[in-house]
Image (cartoon, rainbow, N blue to C red):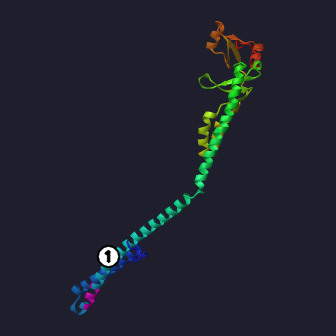
């Protein structure tokens, strides 16, 4: 379509106006025709006037068709011009994005560099924790008591993870744990904008709250079990038949301090 010869200002309003003018011209011609048929001879409109009205009505009808055609051509031309404008904007955006200093690419590279730095830091943390786990294992750090590591192991204990494997090491209420396997998930969370969850995921250091003292502690072979509240029938039965031996107050104090010998070396 040649856009130079199209009047872009023609639109639906022009079509409606042409249709209204055509309707008025038809109505005027119809009134004269009725007068020519129904009026007495001396008051009938002149033939020339009637023909003029008919010609005007026919011209107005043709003018509606022409206006509709021009409006349709203008609509198509405006559509093409709008699409051409989109094309220019696409080319402009593509030119900006293909430059060597594209901001989006630069940010993506910084995120990738930060993720690599995060993985490296997590690996460094894990090397330190793994060394501490190894040293604690070599020195036979005991299992923690109900309230944490034992004084007989200088308040050091290994932290067991899945499948009973050591996942960290504790000193009193403070634990340091391995975080390397969580680095990728943390980087993804941070890139998605959830920095708090990312930080929590790779914290690697946890301070456990002091546990409440239970009402009763029992020996069960080389293990200690605890119970609070009214004694259950199950515990009472096991205490009667000797499968559970209740700790004395002194033994309980020693156990909570991590100094009670109950089978660990």
Foreground residue, 73 or 110?
A: 110
Q: In the rendered image, is residue 31 in sight?
A: no
Residue at 62% across / 37% down in the picture?
A: 183
Find residue 101 and report its image quarter.
bottom right
Q: Is residue 93 above or below residue 222?
A: below
Q: Farthest residue to the front: give it.
A: 100
Q: In the rendered image, is residue 178 in sight?
A: yes
Foreground residue, 264 or 115?
A: 115
Mark 1: few/some/many CA within 10 Å (<14, 14-19, 20+) = some
Q: Which residue is mark 1?
A: 65
Q: Farthest residue to the top: give it.
A: 241
Foreground residue, 106 or 163?
A: 106
Magenta segment boundaries in residue numbering = 48-54
Q: Is residue 126 above or below residue 52?
A: above
Residue 165 percent coordinates (x, y): 62, 23
Helix, strand or loop status at disc 1? helix
């Amino acid at each position: 379509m040649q856009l130079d010869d199209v009047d872009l200002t023609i639109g639906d309003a022009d079509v409606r106006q042409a249709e209204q003018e055509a309707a008025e011209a038809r109505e005027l011609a119809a009134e004269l025709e009725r007068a020519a048929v129904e009026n007495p001879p001396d008051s009938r409109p002149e033939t020339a006037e009637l023909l003029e009205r008919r010609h005007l009505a026919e011209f107005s009808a043709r003018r509606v068709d022409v206006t509709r055609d021009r409006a349709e051509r203008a609509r198509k031309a405006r559509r093409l011009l709008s699409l051409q404008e989109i094309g220019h904007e696409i080319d402009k955006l593509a030119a900006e994005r293909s430059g060597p200093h594209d901001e989006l690419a630069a940010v993506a590279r910084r995120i990738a560099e930060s993720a690599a730095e995060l993985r490296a830091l997590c690996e460094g943390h894990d090397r330190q924790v793994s060394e501490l786990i190894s040293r604690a294992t070599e020195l036979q750090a005991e299992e923690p008591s109900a309230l944490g590591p034992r004084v007989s192991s200088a308040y050091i204990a290994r932290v067991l993870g899945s499948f009973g494997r050591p996942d960290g090491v504790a000193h009193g209420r403070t634990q340091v744990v391995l975080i390397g396997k969580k680095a990728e998930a943390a980087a993804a969370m941070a890139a998605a904008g959830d920095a708090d969850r990312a930080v929590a995921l790779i914290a690697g250091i946890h301070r456990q709250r002091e546990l409440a003292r239970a009402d009763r502690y029992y020996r069960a072979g080389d293990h200690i079990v605890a119970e609070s509240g009214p004694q259950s029938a199950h515990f009472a039965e096991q205490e009667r038949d000797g499968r559970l031996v209740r700790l004395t107050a002194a033994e309980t104090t020693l156990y909570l301090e991590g100094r009670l010998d109950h089978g660990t070396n």
